[in-house]
Image (tube, rainbow, N blue to C red):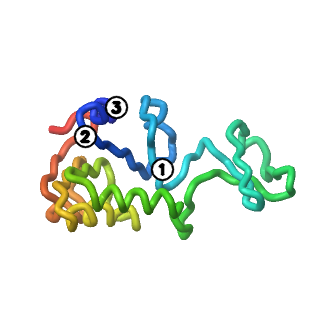
Amino acid sequence: MRFQRWKNIFDDFSLITQNIDNLHQRAGSKHVTELHGNIERNFCIKCRKQYLDIDIFRKKVLKCDCGGLIRPDVVWFGEMLPYNALKFAEECARSSEVFFTIGTSAEVYPAALLPMIAKQFDSYVVEINTKPTVISFDVSETIMGKRGNPA
C-alpha cells in the first residue's frame, strides 16, 4: 500500500503501526503513530535522553552521561504501550468512518482491539491480509491478498 496516496484521498488520515522498523517514514509518511516504538531510536532508562545515532550492537552495555543504561526505544513483551500513542490510536478508532487493518494477526493486544473499537463506533472496518484472522468474520469486509496488491 502506498499510504501517502491514501492521505491524499482521505480528508483526515492517521497511520498507526505496530511496526518498529521505520519503513513507513522511509516511504514518505510524515505523521506515523508507532504503538511499539522504533528500533532506530534509543533512550536512557534513567533520564529518558534520546539517542538516535548510536549502534547499540557495538558494545554489550551502553551508558548515558547520567549513568543510566541505554536501550532500544521499542516495547518488549510484557511492557505497556506508550500511553499517548495508544490513547491517540483509540481516539482514531472511535472517530473513524473507515478503518483499515492491514497485515496483522489481530492477536497482539491491546492493538488488536482497535478494529473492534472502530466497529463498535460504526466505522466500516476493512481487513486486508494473506489469510483469515480471528476478526475476519467480525469486520465489515475482508480482502485476502498481499497488502501491496490485494486480490
Question: 13 or 129, which lies in front?
Answer: 13
The secondary element bearing badge 3 is classed as helix
Q: Quadrant of the N terminus?
A: top left
Image height check: is 103 above or below 112?
A: above
Q: Residues within 10 Å of mark 3 (few under 14, many from 20)?
A: some
Q: Which mark is residue 4?
A: 3
Q: Earlier in the sequence, mark 1 or mark 3?
A: 3
Image height check: is 129 above or below 84?
A: above
Q: Nearer the viewer, mark 3 or mark 2?
A: 3
Residue type, mark 1 in image: Glu
Query: Gap between marks 2 and 1, in whole Å?
Result: 22 Å
Image height check: is 114 above or below 18?
A: below
Q: Residue at x 33, y 53 (%)?
A: 104
Question: 116 or 11, which lies in front?
Answer: 11
Q: x and y percent of residue 86 in the render?
A: 45, 61
Q: Nearer the viewer, mark 2 or mark 1?
A: 1
Query: Gap between marks 1 and 3, in whole Å?
Result: 16 Å
Q: Earlier in the sequence, mark 3 or mark 2?
A: 3
Q: Earlier in the sequence, mark 2 or mark 1?
A: 1
Q: x and y percent of residue 128 in the render?
A: 22, 47
Q: Using residue 130 as the reference point, say whether residue 71 is left or right of it.
A: right
Residue type, mark 2 in image: Lys
Query: Gap between marks 3 and 2, in whole Å?
Result: 18 Å
Residue labelled with disc 2: 146
Q: Using residue 31 as the reference point, say whether residue 71 is left or right of it.
A: right
Q: Residue at x 43, y 30 (%)?
A: 27
Residue type, mark 3 in image: Gln
Occupied quadrant, residue 46? bottom right
Q: Which mark is residue 34?
A: 1
The secondary element bearing badge 1 is classed as strand
The secondary element bearing badge 2 is classed as strand
